Image: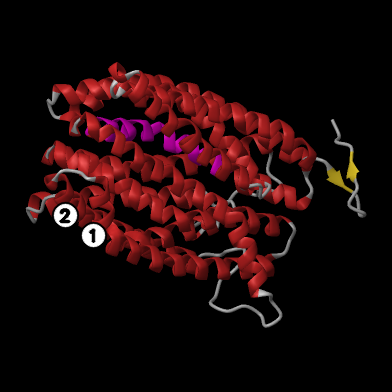
Amino acid sequence: MDRMKGKVKADLLKDPVRPLIFKVTVPVMLAGLLTTSYGFIDMIFASRLGVVQVASIAFITPLFIMLSALAMGVSRGGISIIAKLLGQGKKDLAADYATQLRLVIFTLATVFSLMGILFTPQILKLIRISDELYDQALIYGRIRFFSIPFTLALSLYMTLFKSQGKMEIASRISIFGVVSNVVLNAFCIYVLKLGIDGLAYGTLATKALQALVIIIVYNRGEQDFRIGWTVADSTDVKALWLHLLKVGLPLSITQASGQFGFLVLNMFIVKYGYQAVAAFAIGNRIHSLLFFPSKELGQGLIPLIAQNWGKGAMDRVREAIRGGLIFSLFMGIAGGVIIQMIKYPLGRFLTKGDLETYSHVLDYVGLVGWTVIAWCLFHTLQGIFTSFQRTSFSLIINIFRLWGIRIPGIILCQYFFPSLAEYGVWYTMFISNVLTLIFAVVYFAMKVPPLLQREDKRGRPVPATT
């Protein structure tokens, strides 16, 4: 049976829930790890070029992800809508939503790609970095922004597969991307003798290849629904767009604000030297090897919870939530331990003998790395909220984390505890990650239990069965 064509998938409405949790989360976690490795691979190649190149990527990557995330969040929000409709047996309406989702994503991709290409020079000048850092960041950034349409097309079709429970395809496409990225980066740098522009061209080509492959696989496979370019005349297109944006925009702004936060943090950290900026970038790449898969764990739960919620199978929803939280706690603890083990060899390799940068990396990862436990639980809770199409919390808490905790905390440390230097940033990030989890737990306790009650034909809640 041809797995790449999507003929083998998890039955989210009938298969036992506990095995399903692993079946739907492990492939997307693997895909998340592999997706993160694109940036890690770039960091490895950049470290061979020099610390300035590493620092330049640190400034461009948050800006690139920020613009991509403004559209990617809409795509992720679409998972919960489409999955719920599939659970309700409304395949034609799910196809209509998927069709409109594609139009939304392609429109946003074009706009944000052009924005990145046109406004990167002005943004970098506002940051007031050195001329050498500016030149390298501009070269890398302008090329990378051409890849936004391919990145978002890839994300869209990943979403369509995930909404049907076809998680293995995501990991297979990601494996293909990692191999392609390594080969193309090496070819551009060592064969074509390019510098930091070679990294950007290699990643651009990788994303284009991945987008092409996943579109072909989707169109050739047997799907629960087909997507076209038009919908039935009776379909209220405006209502579909408004629903997609209502659910997706909070996630978009959430992801974008998180990356904007890293851009702002770099502006504070650069005061301590480009070694500190490079260490921050390297430390985040080491974190991402465990942070990003834990983030995807919550995303993997969305179609499982949403489809069963749409069907009204609340006992299965409760079991999925319990199992997901237990699994995320285990993964968080394991991730925290692993990060502390790998920080020495990876830090030494990526800093290429620069002792000051290496010292910064160890200090940063040694403290913030433990917050992968809180990060894993938080994103599992966030995935649960998204399953119920309650995405506004993600927007509020992420804005508060940046503007209510991180930025004020860093400013306070600089003015009242200047001797902490870059440690003020490290401590503030640690505290903000922990507080974010606490707020998410409180919100979960307040909002989720009422959603887990069945309703009778008149819309009245029915007591939960034990």
Note whether residue 30 is visible: yes
Q: Residues within 10 Å of mark 2 (few under 14, many from 20)?
A: many
User: Is 459 positioned to the left or the right of 56 in the image?
Assistant: right
In the picture, the disc for residue 197 is 2
Q: First in sequence: mark 1 or mark 2?
A: 1
Identify the amino acid type marked 1.
Answer: Ile
Which residue is disc 1 drawn over?
143
Which residue is rendered at x = 41% and y = 50% of the image?
172
Identify the amino acid type marked 2.
Answer: Asp
Q: Residues within 10 Å of mark 1 (few under 14, many from 20)?
A: some
Q: Please give the range of residues in magenta.
A: 278-300
SS category of the residue bearing label 1: helix
Which residue is rendered at x = 90% and y = 50% of the image?
456
Q: Is residue 87 magenta?
A: no
SS category of the residue bearing label 2: helix
Q: Is residue 280 magenta?
A: yes
Which residue is rendered at x = 89% and y = 52% of the image?
459
